[in-house]
Image (spheres, rainbow, N blue to C red):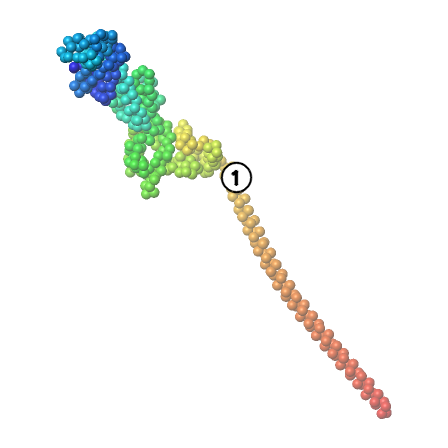
Amino acid sequence: MKSEIVDAFSMMAKEKNIDRDILSSVIKDSFKKMMEKKYGLEANFEIVVNMEKGDIEIFLYKTVVNEVVDDNIEIDIELAKEKSGEEFEIGDEFVEEIPTEEFGRRMVINLKQNLNQKIREIEKEITYNTYKDLVGEILVGEIYQIKPTSILIIHNGNEVIFPKGEQIPKERYKKGDTTRAIVKSIEKRQSGPPLIIVSRADEQFLYKLFELEIPEIYDGIIDIRGIAREPGERAKIAVTSNDDRIDAVGACVGMKGIRIHSIVRELSNENIDVINYTEDPALYISRALSPAKLNDIYLDSENKIAKIYADEDQISLIIGKSGQNIKLASKLTGYQIDVVRATDEDKDDDEDEEDMEEMEEMEDTDEADESDADVEYEEKSEDEAADDSNEESEEDTEDEEAELETEEKSEAGNIKDDTDEKAEAVDGNVK
């Protein structure tokens, strides 16, 4: 039996991209409820839906009896013979086809309403699942309505919301314009389709633009390690290369800046600083604050505070327009950044420290020289002591020799005197 209901909902299913099997199940379920309402829960029936032909057939099964107690599940044997022209026995099963017209106009209207509700629920679920998988991805849609607090965009027949807070402030939008945005979130609503939020101000939008424009990022050769952004004004992005042969920053900027320029144009001339990522927090902060030059950095890693020292002429570069540079650097690195001006007193202190270090080095040198002199002196004293000992030994030897010579002379004199005395005595005796 050809059914206008099946035809109508089959066409709707095609427009809404609903699977035919799902729609067939919904139609069966709707007719089942209608049959149970008309014939009771104990009724035995079968519903056959042919989506290709647009046909629907409903068969009601009854038991052949002599005396009917419940005409929803039983049929008199004579009536069964009359309706079918066939012979039956008590207990046989009689099959009766039920035309949809039998349900009455009101019941058919209720059926259509029920089917409409079911299809809307299916459509909402399909939409939710589709866009849930698109969260974090870029879509392209057409602006069809501009409101004070949001813009409505049509994407594949679905309405998505582009809130004012997710728009780039200096951009101007017109009805009929095509725009790109990232799916930021999606949530179900009790009534109506899911709430789909898109954004052009989100940092993930910048990430995806880099992924689209730079093949090395898409292929995983270059990784994006951090993004900080002031939509429409300035952004900082830290990248690192997984291949030593590839310069991460150079690949992102491209020959003569061709790659980065396409992204800048998409973001209404938003300035983008691309820096090399590093695990060294001091160096990372220094790079994040470029083009400013820093004199020194002191880190409090536990509290994530960085105190930087810089010359007066670098302060404006560090802070940037409306504080953008230092704010983005802080967001990118995760450190609170405090700036200290390097004054003349600081320079004098540095010079004094250098002078003190030089004096300490000189004192260390003098002490080393004195130590060497002491060693030489000690060595010299030992040599002199040895020489003095030798001289004393020689003098003692000379003295001993002189005494010995004197004694020998004395003995010789005594011998001579004795000889003379004896000679005189002899002479006297002779005389």
Give the residue at the far bottom of this rendering: 430
Residue 76 percent location from the top left of the image: 20, 8
Left or right: 351 in relation to 414 = left
Evaluate whether residue 422 shows in this view. yes
Q: Residue type at mark 1: give it.
A: Asp
Instruction: Find disc 1 in the rendering and name its residue.
Output: 349
Q: Is residue 334 above or below residue 160?
A: below
Left or right: 311 in relation to 13 = right
Q: Is residue 220 above or below residue 66?
A: below
Front one among 154 and 118: 118
Q: Is residue 144 above or below residue 381?
A: above
Quarter occupied by the N terminus:
top left
Front one among 295 and 93: 93
Residue 129 percent location from the top left of the image: 30, 24
Tell me where residue 430 sits by quadrant: bottom right
Residue 201 percent location from the top left of the image: 34, 26
Front one among 395 and 128: 128
Q: Circle 1 — which element? A: helix
What residue lies at 30% left-to-right and 36% top-to-bottom?
219
What residue lies at 53% left-to-right and 46% top-to-bottom?
358
What residue lies at 46% left-to-right and 32% top-to-bottom?
304
Evaluate whether residue 109 shows in this view. no
Residue 100 percent location from the top left of the image: 19, 11
What residue lies at 82% left-to-right and 85% top-to-bottom?
421
